[in-house]
Image: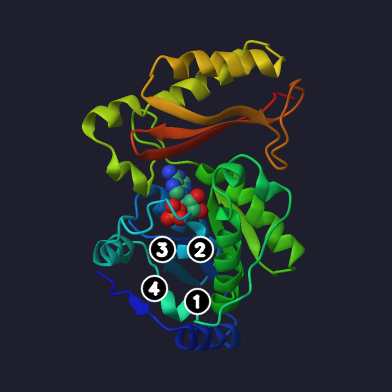
Amino acid sequence: MQKIQTIRTIAQMQSLSKDWKREGKRIGFVPTMGALHEGHLSLVELVRPQCERLVVSVFVNPTQFGPKEDLERYPRNLEGDLSRLAERKVDVVFAPEKGEIYKKEHATYVEVEGLSSVYEGAIRPGHFRGVCTVVAMLFNIIMPDVAAFGQKDAQQAAVLRHLTQDLHFPIRFLVGLTIRESDGLAMSSRNAYLTSAERRKATVLFRALKAGEARIQAGERDGGNVREAMKDVLSGVPEFKPDYNDIVHPESFEKVNEICGDVLLIIAGKIGSVRLIDNLLVQQKT
Ligand code: AMP
């Protein structure tokens, strides 16, 4: 099995990326917070054919966690991550310490206005500011030609696509499909927190999304009715406490009342102490 190079400093990563660029190698990049699962690995597979060198970052980014969130207990397993990536032709894992990325005097933050303040942004104030800041830094450190993000975090992908365009990063932006467990639960590092009883209940998000999709496919055009159909399924599992349950435009995240094009069904909430988020893109047949 190939041994992956692990880099922990910005200077070393930037120097290697510059060497690769001089050699004309296209660099692919998949940012992660580690505790890797098949969802992350699918992004590696998505980028691989488009680059000659591939970097995966593993960094639990403190600035995207709120004060009451799970930063301290977020699962960390770099050895396990390295062995999962070893079979996937990854060249470098960039795994800096917190103090390497955020120097004591750090004072610069990146914010995508508007889109960052609804849904996930409203429930988790400052979350997207943290995500955007670290991704902009990682883009400057790794200098990728192509980078991949998951549709699982659809709003994050929309925010980061905006950032990439607005700041003129010369990076091809890919979004990979959501990878699910066999019962429909979207894979997530946080699923590891679920008790077995909670794990069984957690399928309710996907079931609600599918119910919404079925209504649209049956010809329903009223957003309110589709929301109700999703809500009916969610209320069957009272342990699930929704933060939101809605139908939005897939890029702007504006609420959709009358369905006349592609829409995104979005759900997020908590089961016990575990926060779950999922979405489903419903495309109109042309
Ligand atoms: P995270 O480690 O949770 O920050 O996720 C790193 C990247 O993997 C993000 O672009 C996520 O959207 C993506 N990702 C997480 N879960 C999945 C999944 N189940 N399927 C596809 N991509 C995912």
Q: Is mark 1 within 8 Å of ligand 1?
A: no
* Amino acid residing under circle 1: Tyr
Residue 101 vertical placement versus 195 (above, below): below
Question: Which of marks 2 and 1 precedes in the sequence?
Answer: 2
Residue 129 vertical placement versus 188 (above, below): below
Instruction: Residue 87: give x, y in percent of width and height.
Output: 31, 62
Q: Are marks 1 and 2 in contact (CB under 8 Å)?
A: yes
Alpha carbon separation for disc pair 2 and 3:
9 Å
Report the disc number at residue 102. 1
Write the residue at 29% across / 31% down. Answer: 199
Return the residue nearer the eye: 93 or 238.
Answer: 238
Instruction: Point out the frontmost of discs 3 and 1.
Output: 1
Q: How crowded is mark 4: few (under 14 residues within 10 Å), some or many (20 or more)?
A: many
Report the disc number at residue 60. 3
Instruction: Residue 66: give x, y in percent of width and height.
Output: 48, 54
Question: Which of marks 2 and 4 precedes in the sequence?
Answer: 2
Q: Is mark 3 within 8 Å of ligand 1?
A: no
Where is mark 4, residue-wise? Answer: 95
Kindly indicate the quadrant of the structure image that contains residue 132.
bottom right
Which residue is at the far left? 196
**Whether residue 144 is visible:** no
Q: Do the residues labelled 4 and 3 touch (CB within 8 Å)?
A: no
